[in-house]
Image (cartoon, grey):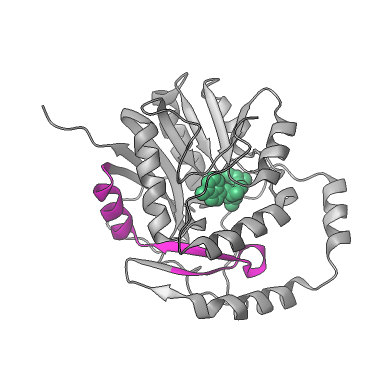
Amino acid sequence: MEGDEVSAPASAESSQDGLNRATWARTVLEFVTEGWADRGELAMLLDLSDEFRGRSILDIGVGAGRTVPLIRLMTRDYIALDYTAEMVQLCADRYPDVDVRHDDARTLSTVPDDSIELVMFSANGIDAVGHEDRQEVLNSVHRVLRPGGVFAFSTLNRDGAFFGATPADAPDTPWVPGSLRPRSTSIEQQQASDDDDLPWIRAVRNWRRLRSRTQDHGEWAIGPFAAHEFSLLVHFITLSGARRELAERGFVLEKIYQCDDAHPLVGASTNALYFHVVARVATIPA
Ligand SMILES: C[S@@+](CC[C@H](N)C(=O)[O-])C[C@H]1O[C@@H](n2cnc3c(N)ncnc32)[C@H](O)[C@@H]1O
């Protein structure tokens, strides 16, 4: 385990960051799973696996390590990192032979320039930071990728039903039943004993507290997110917005996988709840 001091940039978005990081720290045991999250993620990994077999892969926002066994099917040249200390500790305990670092996606201070061939940021982790800080994430990922390298991540859709959802109408997640290994009974028991309140009441209370912080800028937005009983304030983006921001940061968007579909998206828009993006570092024509 490396990099105990995380240097998050000071910014006006730090209160959003503080809120989300406190939620991750509190819910760390919910992330003790293995397996793919949804059909789109599995399809994307299968498509990437030939190109990146045996190559250097950086797994940002690894959490408790769900993606560790999946990505190590592709390579042993693997670095995982997360900015939530509790997640880093748990992941390192579960996978003692993995290089798990405490680092922030906005700086990637422990990762050298041009050193990685595939960067992954799964489960909409990129959406935890605000819009300006998201540009820092894209800049840092671009810095550590080798020319022609790929950034694969998932992101919440501004045109999907999670944006603007309330506790009364929030959609279910599209996780594939059985694709995630169940948690152990002891963890479930521990969580049950920690719960002294009804989830519904917590969700309504959190949503009321966060909804006034909603911002809608058309191609992107900030708003409460239904996960963890509405205790996250997250970024949403449209497909056209994602294409634009990636181009501005030196990436070419190659493929989109909707969360609930095993085939790459054909078309210029989607109302999926979230989508997976495969973006490649743009090369300058000779
Ligand atoms: C939804 S959890 C997903 C965890 C894991 N990838 C999984 O699929 O189970 C998102 C993770 O991203 C991490 N994260 C969010 N923003 C981050 C940042 N700026 N730098 C590093 N990690 C971050 C959080 O701490 C959290 O562990």
Residue 232 included in the magenta stretch of the image: yes
Residue 77 location (% of width, % of height) = 52, 21
Which quarter of the rendering shows the N terminus? top right
Residue found at x 67% / y 22%: 97
Q: Does 80 appear above or below 87?
A: above
User: Looking at the image, which residue is at 39% across and 25% down?
Assistant: 51
Q: Nearer the viewer, residue 71 or 24?
A: 24
Region rendered in magenta: 222-251
* Along the viewing direction, whichever of 271 and 163 lies nearer the viewer: 163
The quadrant of the image that shows the C terminus is: top left
Quadrant of the rendered image containing residue 182: top right
Q: Is residue 28 magenta?
A: no
Q: Is residue 48 left or right of residue 189?
A: left
Q: Position of residue 149 (x, y in %)?
A: 34, 30
Left or right: residue 237 versus residue 181 is: left
Tell me residue 269's x, y (percent).
Answer: 31, 60
**11 in relation to 257, above or below:** below
